[in-house]
Image (cartoon, helix red, strand yellow):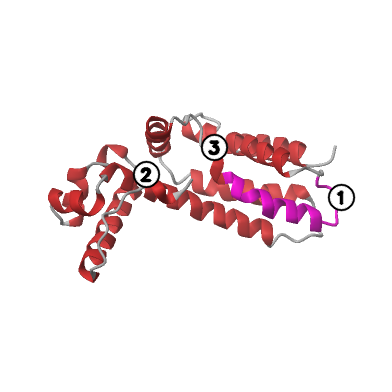
Amino acid sequence: MPDKKIEFAENKQERSKQTLENILEAANQIIEQADPKYFTSRVLAAKSGYSLGTLNKRLLSVDNVFIWLIEQGQKQHIRYATQLIAEFDPHLPLQQLVEMLVDAFFSVMKKINPKVIRYYEHRMAVKEGLIEDYERVDALVKPFLAAAKNNRTSTFRELNEAELRLVLRASLSLLERPFVFSDPIAGTSEHRKIAVENSVRMLGRL
């Protein structure tokens, strides 16, 4: 998702930049507490040590700050997945790449309170009319196509960019939705098996 959803007041003074950095750091610490009931102006003011007036002056929209920081975390996770794909040994089969990616996503999702994800999705639905946010996984399309082209095991299915985009979004749903809705299967060996096997079916040769 683009960064334009957050609004920062324009000010080039060094002191103002430091104030903004301090506020963002405080907001990030609140997010790490993993409970959206604390994603408020008053909690952010208390945590950062700045007044509500200063927050309004520097941020314009406190709600957008939490959305933006959550997005930055998502992008960091996608960058890591992109690195895994780019560095994948072309002499190893698709199954091993999928297992690496599933384990990486599981590791992240197990640390996130599902309430935070539901908070983000609700806010984005209100702001942008979005029901599901799968755009972030689109960053994996080109690296995955390159990995498939370079692979020497004949286990990758030939997919065009449009089809691969849809398949990766479907795989993301298999990985994330059980965590988001606190399904008992989330993060279990059975969930991992389902995610791996179905992703390999969609991405690999029959």
Cα–Cα gap, marks 3 and 1? 28 Å
Q: What stretch is highlighted in magenta?
A: 137-156
Picture disc at residue 67: 2
User: Relative to the observer, which residue lies in front, 138 or 116?
Assistant: 138
Q: Is tag 3's residue or tag 1's residue first in the polypeptide sequence?
A: 1
Cα–Cα gap, marks 1 and 2? 41 Å
Q: Where is residue 105 in the image (x, y as percent from the top left)?
A: 56, 47
> Mark 2 is on which residue type?
Ile
Quick check: is 139 in the magenta stretch?
yes
**Residues under numbered marks 3 and 2 in contact, where contact means CB atoms less than 8 Å apart:** no
User: Relative to the observer, which residue lies in front, 12 or 163?
Assistant: 12
Lateral position of residue 40 relative to residue 203, left or right: left
**What residue is rendered at 76% in x and 43% in y?**
160
According to the picture, the residue beneath numbered tag 1 turns out to be: 154
> Mark 3 is on which residue type?
Glu
According to the picture, the residue beneath numbered tag 3 turns out to be: 176
Seen in the picture, residue 166 relative to 8 is either above or below; the reply is above
The secondary element bearing badge 2 is classed as helix
Seen in the picture, residue 46 relative to 17 is either above or below; the reply is above
The answer, for residue 198, to whether it is visible in the render is: yes
User: Relative to the observer, which residue lies in front, 53 or 181?
Assistant: 53
**What residue is rendered at 68% in x and 48% in y?**
99
Q: Is tag 1's residue or tag 2's residue first in the polypeptide sequence?
A: 2
Question: Callout 3: few (<14), some (14-19), or many (20+) C-alpha neighbours within 10 Å?
Answer: some
Which quadrant is home to the C terminus?
top right
The secondary element bearing badge 1 is classed as loop
Quick check: is 143 in the magenta stretch?
yes
Count all numbered tags in the image, as a single digit.
3
